[in-house]
Structures are given as C-alpha cells and as structure tokens.
C-alpha cells in the first residue's frame, strides 16, 4: 500500500511540475476562457446514461494505457502482479476522479459504480495487452519541410500530442472555444520549441536570414491551421472575429518566438533560459488590445535579431573558433 501511495504522490508532483512549466497564470487564464465550454460538457455528461459513461471510461483508459511508456518501469518496481494491478487501478481512478466527484455530488451512484467497474475490469484484463520492449523509433514526417526543422523535430518527438492539439480545432461544430484553445496550446508549445539553438554549422546564413525564417515557419503553420480555421467559419460564422483573432495570435506568437530566439542567439549555448518576459508577452497576446504590446515588442526583437545574427555570421563577423 505504501508503494501505491508513493507512486500516486509522484504523479501529483509530476502534474504540478508540468503546470509550473506551462505557467500557473496561463493555465488559470485557459480555464477562464473555457468556462462556458466546461459547463456545456458537464451538462452533457450528466445527461448520459450510466452504461455510456462506463464504456467511455473504459475506452479512455485503454487509449491512455496504450500510449504509456512507463509500464516496464512499473513492472520492475512492483514485487508481484497484484501490486502492479493495484498501482494501475489507483492511477486510473485518480485520472477519473473529477468524473467520480461530479456524479457523487449529483448523487448519480450508478454512474459512479460504472466508472469503478469499467476501471477494475480493464485492470483485470490489462495483462492481455502486450507491452512493447522495443525502444520507440522516431519516425520522420516528410510532409514537414526541413526549413522548419524546429517544428519538425518537436512534432516527431510527440506526434500524438500535436495530433490532439490540431484535432481540437475541428471540434468547433460543438463549441466555438475549441479553435482558440487549439491555437493557445499551440502558441505555448511554439515558445518552448524555439528556445533551442542550433550549432553554428547548421545555420545556413543568408541575407535577411531572420525574415526568411519567419516566412517559412509562418507559411507552414498558416497552411496547416487553415482547415480548422475554415471549419470554425463554417460552423460558427457568428464568431468570425474570434477565429480571426485566434489566427492573429498564432502569427504574432510565431514571429515573437523566432525573433526572441535569434535576438538572444549565441554559439556558446544550446538553448535559451526560461524568460518571464516571454511568458508575460504570451499571456498578453490572449487579451484583446494587449496584443499590440506583443506586436510592438516583436518588431523591436526583429531588428535586434537581425543585428545579432549579422554580428555572428555577416561579412564583418569576428573570427571565432568553435
């Protein structure tokens, strides 16, 4: 039992650490703008039958279990199969605890029982699902051009995550908030994606290097997010300005992330340190009107980035040995 509690405590700490990495203020802001969507989802869940909830719980646990990479580790630290199954049951019940709490508060006990039953049934059958002992192989995504290698590398490391982010944009037939949520999450990941600095041999210097970098990455992202944008317009035409503003956020944050990267570029470092300024500018981008501050700062960073890159790679660059 102590081992199960230790692992559950570890999961909670991992969740809190992930929240800190994204930013507590950003997470609270995302929860605020999705409040209306959350209310509709809660109402829809309360109207579902207990059998449907049980099936959805089983399917959700199955998808999470299939994507896990730590099953071999859990098996190695558990002394026997029953301890391993206890850990799995505890983790999945913790994952479904918001649903359990929702139905318990509304006294829908059959729904609570169906969630517990589906969880325990899955855990009992979990040993039938083979655990891969092979190391995951990173697959190259050829539809992403090499010119956008930062995005390409990040998507190849976590393709399912980005598929989920992208797919959210197509759910606007249910609620208009899905498209802005998709853009907000993508914007946060773009800031993190462009914090890594390529070594000098990989910098293919050209005149107007920063401008070309912005053009290529922005062109790819706009092409990728055009289908969900059109879907939003098709089903939520009354909220056309929300969709347009979301695209403006995507454009602004992309330019900001690239300019910030090259304005602070140095051959001595592999990645940029976390910046409170970037976090604040990212948050301001989501507030109507305040995005002008982010746009202004992005213009300032653009000229700073051009000057910084010309210093290292231009015709008058200093002689350096790497």
Image (tube, helix red, strand yellow):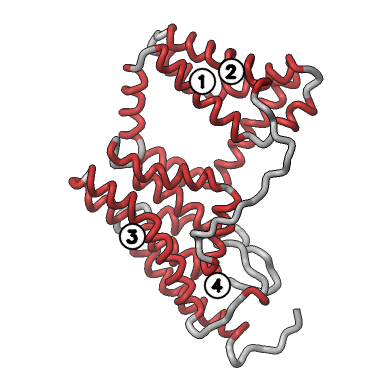
Quadrant of image for the C terminus? bottom right
| Label 2 close to label 3 by CB (< 8 Å) | no
Sort mark 4 into few (<14), some (14-19) or many (20+) by Cα contacts within 10 Å.
Answer: many
Q: Of the residues under marks 1 and 4, which one precedes in the sequence?
A: 1
Q: Along the horizontal axis of the image, is 21 left or right of 238? A: right
Compared to 198, does 161 lie above or below?
Answer: above
Secondary structure of the residue carrying numbered label 2 = helix
Q: Along the horizontal axis of the image, is 202 left or right of 246? A: right
Would you name the residue on which mark 3 appears?
Answer: 248
Compared to 65, does 101 lie above or below?
Answer: above
Q: Along the horizontal axis of the image, is 241 left or right of 163? A: left
Q: Of the residues under marks 3 and 4, which one precedes in the sequence?
A: 3
Q: CA distance from mark 1 to mark 4?
A: 47 Å
| Label 1 close to label 2 by CB (< 8 Å) | yes
At x 63%, y 88%, the residue is 317
Q: Mark 2, mark 4: which one is toward the viewer? A: 2
Return the x and y of residue 290 as percentages of the image width and height. Answer: 34, 58
């Amino acid at each position: 039992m102590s081992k199960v509690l230790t692992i559950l405590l570890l999961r909670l700490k991992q969740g809190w650490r992930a929240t800190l990495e994204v930013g507590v203020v950003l997470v609270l802001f995302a929860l605020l703008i999705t409040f209306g969507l959350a209310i509709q989802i809660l109402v829809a869940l309360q109207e579902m039958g207990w059998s449907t909830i049980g099936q959805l719980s089983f399917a959700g646990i199955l998808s999470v279990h299939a994507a896990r990479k730590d099953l071999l580790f859990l098996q190695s630290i558990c002394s026997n199969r029953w301890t391993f199954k206890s850990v799995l049951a505890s983790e999945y019940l913790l994952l479904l605890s918001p649903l359990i709490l929702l139905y318990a508060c509304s006294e829908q006990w059959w729904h609570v029982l169906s969630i517990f039953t589906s969880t325990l049934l899955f855990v009992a059958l979990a040993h039938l699902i083979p655990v891969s002992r092979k190391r995951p192989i990173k697959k190259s995504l050829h539809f992403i051009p090499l010119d956008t290698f930062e995005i390409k590398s990040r998507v190849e490391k976590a393709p399912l995550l980005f598929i989920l982010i992208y797919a959210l944009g197509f759910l606007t037939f249910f609620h208009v908030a899905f498209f802005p949520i998709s853009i907000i999450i993508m914007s946060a990941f773009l800031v993190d994606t462009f914090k890594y600095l390529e070594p000098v041999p990989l910098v293919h210097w050209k005149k107007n290097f920063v401008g070309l970098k912005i053009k290529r990455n922005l062109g790819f992202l706009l092409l990728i997010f055009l289908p969900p944008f059109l879907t939003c317009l098709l089903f939520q035409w009354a909220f056309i300005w929300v969709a347009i503003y979301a695209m403006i956020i995507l454009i602004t944050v992309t330019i900001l992330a690239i300019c910030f990267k090259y304005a602070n570029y140095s051959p001595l470092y592999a990645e940029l340190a976390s910046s409170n300024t970037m976090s604040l500018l990212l948050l301001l981008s989501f507030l109507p009107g305040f995005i002008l501050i982010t746009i202004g700062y992005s213009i300032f960073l653009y000229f700073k980035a051009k000057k910084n890159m010309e210093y290292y790679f231009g015709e008058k660059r200093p002689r350096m040995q790497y």
